[in-house]
């Protein structure tokens, strides 16, 4: 929690004035039992004066009204500070998460990050509000009640001290055993979030395989684990109230018993006993508040630790500078050059890519093919520097990609990833991601090239059609074509199509490739595919096998020289197209 104090720097006034208001309320609350004692001892027992009783009753009302006003001011300041800090934490988390590279996002995981932005931040936010409201008030009430008891009767105040010690021991016993369990609860919430996200995202797959019962068992098991852990901590917390109330009531009985003896002996007044009972009750309520505050702070501490874990995670891919660099690329300079490239996701074990060398000239179309897990997608993700190479280097226009600012490097690329992702909003908004000021004519041209304009033109609202989250209101093939169109808007210097034709039928695939050849003339294009027909007309084809280049050349050259490429072609093309 201490590390997150920086988010309160804009709310110093609220953090200071709020507790002071609550402290003032506590002082007024401590005065009320003394006023009650005066009403009993002076107004009733001594003077028998109704007007005195009414005056003192009016004073009690005034104290209550003033205390309420002070509490309302504290509530306002606490809400302002906690909501403001919570907003800043969420904003900072979101910005920091977006600054992380792919490797860190893979490690942390989407469900966990969502839980940290929402649930964990809410816990911290709530703890800030309760700390401002109660962190000063509860201890002050306890200490103030003890001092007021001493001022009334020193011997009887020993009962207060004994009761306070017993309640404190009870609090320590419960809290010391429940603190570790709250951290476990947060982890189990993460697990439920993961299972829920997978089930919601893969709902169609689950139904297709009739796995509803199996997935129900998974979520039931996770929720049962959370339930058991929550019940365990609740049982510990449940000890708190009965034990503290038992100690407090025993203390009140002792006060009344010994107080009555002192009253009969003439050493105390009746009002003093009432005041002592009131102070004992205030200590009880304050102790319960402290217990609840400790529970809340424990949860918040676990949540703050998880939030700080995100902030302390540094991106492995960082910019050397943020200003655009000068690139003097002549016509002979390769658009992309890969030298002795080696890459490993985990940093240990076998490399996903190794000893890879490739030169791509401006305007060339490069096909990349290979078996599953051969490193095709990994290769194209290294070009815009989503990951940093473990060894070797990648050059764009003759400059190492590590020297580029992210914005200058990545605005050269138009990328269509394997998973077609559209964002909620209008179709026009999605098409303008690469070029915010793109005209409708540019968008329509890109849609035509991507073979998407035919179905977009039939939509009642055209480019203003609403896109649901993830593009759920479009089919898989439609999403792929729309993603291709989005990448084409603004004509990037390098177009990367990462297995972007997989959901297209062969006729649409052929029409799209034909349109792309015309539209991307002069544009460097990399096509990752598992279909020979998709890349056979490429200027150069790279065949990957176990992270290595098994062959580099044209379709005809590879048929003669690369056995792996020949095997792939035999499995897809007719015998007449693949020579023996």
Image: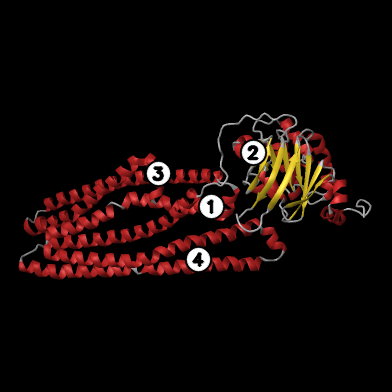
Q: Quadrant of residue 180?
A: bottom left
Residue 375 x %, y %: 71, 52
Give the CA distance from mark 2 to mark 1: 32 Å
Give the CA distance from mark 4 to mark 3: 33 Å
Residue pointed to by mark 3: 6
Q: Earlier in the sequence, mark 3 or mark 2?
A: 3
Give the CA distance from mark 2 to mark 4: 49 Å
Q: Is residue 269 above or below residue 543?
A: below
Q: Earlier in the sequence, mark 4 or mark 3?
A: 3
At mark 2, the secondary structure is strand
Q: Is residue 573 above or below residue 317?
A: below
Residue pointed to by mark 4: 226
Q: Quadrant of residue 200?
A: bottom right
Residue 373 x %, y %: 72, 56
Looking at the image, is mark 2 or mark 1 nearer the viewer?
2
Residue pointed to by mark 1: 113
Q: Which mark is residue 400?
A: 2
Looking at the image, is mark 2 or mark 4 nearer the viewer?
2
């Amino acid at each position: 929690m201490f590390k997150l104090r920086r988010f309160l720097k804009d709310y110093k006034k609220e953090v200071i004035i709020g507790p002071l208001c609550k402290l003032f309320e506590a002082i007024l609350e401590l005065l009320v039992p003394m006023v009650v004692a005066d009403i009993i001892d002076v107004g009733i027992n001594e003077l028998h004066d109704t007007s005195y009783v009414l005056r003192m009753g009016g004073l009690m009302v005034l104290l209550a009204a003033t205390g309420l006003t002070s509490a309302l001011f504290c509530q306002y300041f606490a809400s302002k500070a906690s909501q403001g800090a919570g907003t800043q934490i969420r904003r900072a988390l979101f910005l920091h998460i977006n600054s992380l590279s792919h490797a860190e996002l893979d490690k942390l995981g989407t469900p966990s990050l969502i839980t940290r932005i929402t649930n964990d931040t809410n816990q911290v936010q709530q703890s800030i509000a309760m700390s401002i409201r109660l962190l000063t008030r509860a201890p002050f009430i306890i200490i103030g009640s003890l001092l007021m008891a001493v001022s009334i009767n020193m011997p009887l105040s020993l009962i207060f001290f004994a009761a306070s010690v017993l309640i404190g021991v009870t609090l320590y016993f419960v809290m010391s055993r429940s603190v570790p369990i709250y951290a476990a609860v947060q982890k189990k919430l993460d697990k439920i979030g993961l299972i829920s996200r997978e089930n919601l995202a893969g709902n169609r797959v689950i139904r297709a395989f009739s796995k509803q019962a199996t997935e129900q068992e998974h979520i039931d098991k996770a929720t049962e684990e959370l339930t058991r852990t929550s019940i365990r901590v609740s049982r510990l917390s449940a000890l708190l109230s009965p034990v503290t109330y038992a100690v407090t009531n025993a203390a009140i009985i002792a006060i009344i018993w010994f107080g009555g003896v002192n009253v009969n002996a003439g050493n105390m007044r009746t009002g003093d006993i009432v005041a002592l009972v009131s102070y004992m009750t205030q200590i009880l309520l304050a102790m319960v508040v402290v217990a609840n505050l400790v529970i809340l702070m424990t949860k918040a501490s676990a949540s703050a630790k998880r939030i700080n874990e995100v902030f302390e995670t540094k991106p492995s891919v960082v910019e050397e500078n943020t200003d655009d660099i000068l690139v003097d690329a002549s016509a002979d300079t390769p658009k992309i050059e890969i030298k002795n490239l080696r890459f490993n996701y985990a940093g240990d074990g076998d490399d996903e890519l190794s000893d890879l060398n490739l030169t791509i000239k401006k305007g060339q179309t490069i096909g990349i093919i290979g078996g599953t897990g051969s490193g095709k997608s990994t290769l194209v993700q290294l070009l815009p520097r989503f990951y940093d190479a473990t060894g070797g280097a990648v050059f764009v226009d003759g400059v190492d990609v590590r020297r580029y600012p992210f914005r200058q490097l990545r605005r050269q690329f138009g990328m269509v990833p394997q998973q077609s992702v559209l964002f909620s909003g209008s179709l026009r908004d999605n098409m303008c991601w690469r070029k915010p000021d793109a005209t409708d004519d540019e968008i329509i041209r890109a849609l035509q090239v991507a073979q998407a304009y035919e179905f977009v033109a039939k939509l009642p609202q055209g480019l203003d059609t609403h896109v649901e989250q993830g593009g759920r209101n479009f089919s898989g093939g439609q999403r792929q074509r729309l993603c291709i169109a989005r990448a084409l808007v603004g004509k990037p210097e390098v177009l990367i199509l990462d297995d972007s034709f997989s959901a297209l039928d062969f006729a649409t695939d052929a029409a799209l490739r034909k349109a792309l050849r015309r539209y991307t003339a002069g544009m460097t294009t990399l096509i990752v595919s598992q279909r020979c027909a998709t890349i056979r007309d490429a200027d150069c084809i790279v065949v990957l096998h176990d992270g290595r280049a098994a062959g580099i050349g044209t379709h005809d050259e590879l048929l003669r020289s690369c056995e792996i490429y020949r095997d792939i072609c035999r499995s897809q093309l007719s015998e007449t197209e693949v020579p023996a």
